[in-house]
Image (cartoon, rainbow, N blue to C red):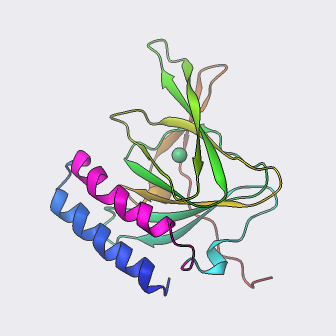
Amino acid sequence: MTSTRFNDFVDNLRQVIDEADGNEQRIRTQAEPLLRDLVSHDDWLEEKYSIPHPDYYQQYCLYACPKGKFSVVSFVWGPGQKTPVHDHTVWGIIGMLRGAEIGERYVQQEDGSLRPEGSEELRRGMTDYVSPSTGDIHRVSNAYDDRVSISIHVYGADIGKVKRHVYVPETGEVKNFISGYAQLPATLP
Ligand code: FE
């Protein structure tokens, strides 16, 4: 990414995370406003990181800390696209850059089954937070059937490499997964 706004965001984020020294509450308190400010401007995301796939939501790595402490990802939702129900196993902050998304939260019960905990719509300029300490399992969908939405996510690890889980809420089935990142298109359309 060549944008000064984005690179300043990464520098500030790195400072917050380094100084917080693993204190998640402090990271959230200081990093969420940084992300809210970033997504309140829509003049910095390079086009190649904003291209939807016709069949699947895309996760483009915008920045991965070389020490693996954090990563920044653009999630590009084609019309009607959604994730499976999944967890993260690390903290994450989500900021809405374009359009809107629906987050449906789930809570795992003692018998392993998942109970829906309601849903929220995240609109442009808003942020949300996920963490194993406060509730980490959700499904995310594009709020729109007729247009692309884009959210920017920050995670407390190189999220494309993290071992985590997808769930089938109806059956309680759990599968391991590692998301990886989307490949950049070879040529822009
Ligand atoms: Fe998620």
Is 165 situated above or below 16?
Answer: above
Which of the two residues, 160 or 148, is positioned nearer the viewer here? 148
Task: Pinpoint residue 107: horizontal percent, then vertical percent.
Answer: 48, 24
> Picture quarter containing residue 140?
top right
Say whether residue 31 is magenta. Answer: yes
Compared across the picture, whether 18 is left or right of 156 comes to left
Where is residue 19 drawn, in percent x and y? 16, 62
Residue 116 x, y percent position in the rendering: 58, 23
Q: Is residue 110 above or below residue 55?
A: above
Q: In the rendered image of this protein, does residue 111 appear above or below residue 41?
A: above
On the question of residue 109 being in view, the answer is yes
Q: Residue at x 76, y 63 (%)?
A: 53
The residue at the point 41 percent across, 50 percent down is 92
Q: Quadrant of the C terminus?
A: bottom right
Q: 166 or 44, which lies in front?
A: 44
Tell me which segment is drawn in magenta: 24-44
In the figure, is residue 121 to the left or right of 188?
left
Answer left or right for 103 relative to 161.
right
Q: What residue is shown at x 49% (from left), y 12% (from top)?
A: 111
View extreme (top): residue: 111
Residue 146 location, x and y as percent?
83, 55
Count of numbered badges drawn on the protein: 0
Query: On the image, which quarter does residue 186 sit in?
Result: bottom right
Magenta stretch, main secondary structure, is helix
Q: Is residue 71 visible?
A: no
Q: Residue at x 44, y 13 (%)?
A: 110
136 magenta-colored: no
